[in-house]
Image: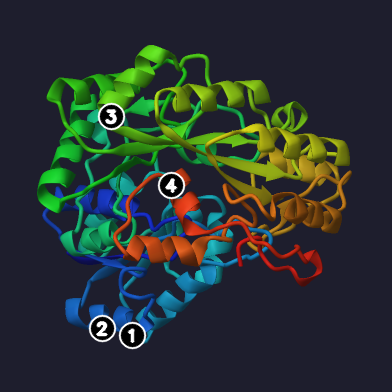
Amino acid sequence: MNILLISSNIAETPYAVYPLGMSMVAAALKKDNHEITMFDFLHRGQSLDAVTDVVRRVKPELIGISIRNIDNVNSLNEQRYIDTVKAIVGAIRRETTVKIVIGGSGFSVMPAAVLEAVGADYGITGEGEDIFRKFVAEAASGRYPQERIIKAEHRLAGTGIPSAVYDPEIMRFYLQSGHMASIQTKRGCEYGCVYCTYPLLEGRTIREREPSAVVDDMEALVNNHQAKYIFFTDSVFNDNRGRYRGIVRELKRRNLQIPWSAFFKPSMELDDEIMELMKETGLRAAEIGSDAPSDTTLRGIGKDFLFQDVVNCNNLFLKHGIATAHYFMFGCPGETPETVREGIDNIMKLSKTAIFVFMGIRILPNTALADIALREGLIRKDQSLLESVYYISPRVDRQWLETTLREAFFKTRHIVFPPDALESKLHFLFKMGYTGSLWDLVAKADKPRKEKANSNKGTSAFA
């Protein structure tokens, strides 16, 4: 079949991310010799006219749309991405009557609500590579399922997880918009964070790819696309059993020299030996999933480490000359005015790092956080969560929390609140060809303001 795949993602904070999911589905479909065209909405300037043009040019027999996120999970400056998908579907409908199938993590978290909202014909939940191949095989014979939502029957592992087919033109755009190419090394999440959908989407069992296949992808990105920086997109790179070490050892064996970065969890499993080996193989920056800035709120969101572990982890990376960035949320279950002040003090003690601060936690269906919010009367049992709802502990006043955070972080260049406060300046640096860690980006992006904060105007600390 002649198939058009569209990535609908438009998020660019803190940097634009190559549409890996679409490219992995494309790789699976190419095994059956289908003719695949990949279209990235962000790459094409978020232009609906460009959508119309590609539909006219390609004349597809089937169209798939990937949804990465529902919104930007920023309670202070929300952007709804579902409206974008609806607009894309509308543009397609004006040109063709072929079936439209949607998928991706943003669809799978609440499939029925999203399918109804965007107006597509079908939706696929879970890992789409195999199930979409079967859908296409049936569609090629004119057969379509009665059910509009199709669930993936099983999860892929090892060699079953395909290498992505990286589109040269799309990749060139992303390399010019942040100089990072994306690779997935495994699927699944073994942790119990109350807000997270990774275990729901990918299961709680880690399914890793072969280290040789991962490094093959890295070499291909360097040799074929001139990638200058690799980002591993796993929810957590350093799994508890240390399976990520196989990738690091393979990098060392091949002597592949390219900077790379990943998400890390504070863990006793990290030590000087693996740090030095990761640095030797190109690790330049670590994005640490600290998530909450006090022991009380870390317990509240289901973390299995304490804030001192965050400090130790940060210091270990810095000891080996690896830049770090942290993401913290205020308003977690168990949050009180006292823990807010404690969290601010804790964050201030972290040195030589970039810190992004969020207020509230986006509530998603079928998570433990949704159960907590239901018990506390913050949401109703029958409430659609497609319209965003943010959890903020009932023991903390929302306006007080926002004012307190703005005043606390207003003059601290390395602490970003709201989380999109540096967005325009980061994009400028990327367009100028800058490549580097988030700490370096934040350091270069702005200088402390001299004037006093004015919380009542709602201006960002780096406006």
Q: Which mark is residue 296?
A: none
Q: Residue at x 42, y 25 (%)?
A: 238
Snapshot quadrant of residue 341: top right
| Relative to 462, 131 lies left or right | left
Task: Identify the residue shown where x is 23% and y is 47%.
Answer: 228
Determine whether 210 is above or below 1 in the image: above
Amino acid carrying mark 3 in the image: Arg
> Mark 3 touching mark 1, by CB under 8 A?
no
Q: Which mark is residue 49?
A: 1
- Which residue is drawn at the image coordinates 86% and 36% (left, top)? 338
Specify the quadrant that holds the C terminus.
Answer: bottom right
Q: Secondary structure at mark 1?
A: helix
Cα–Cα span, label 2 and label 1: 6 Å
Percent coordinates x, y for residue 139 in the rendering:
26, 62
Disc 2 residue type (three-letter) = Asp
- Determine if residue 110 is in view: yes
| Few, some or many residues within 10 Å of mark 4 (<14, 14–19, 20+) | some
Nearer the N terminus, badge 4 or badge 1?
Answer: 1
Q: Which tag, 3 or 2, sits closer to the chain's start? A: 2
Left or right, residue 213 beside residue 455? left
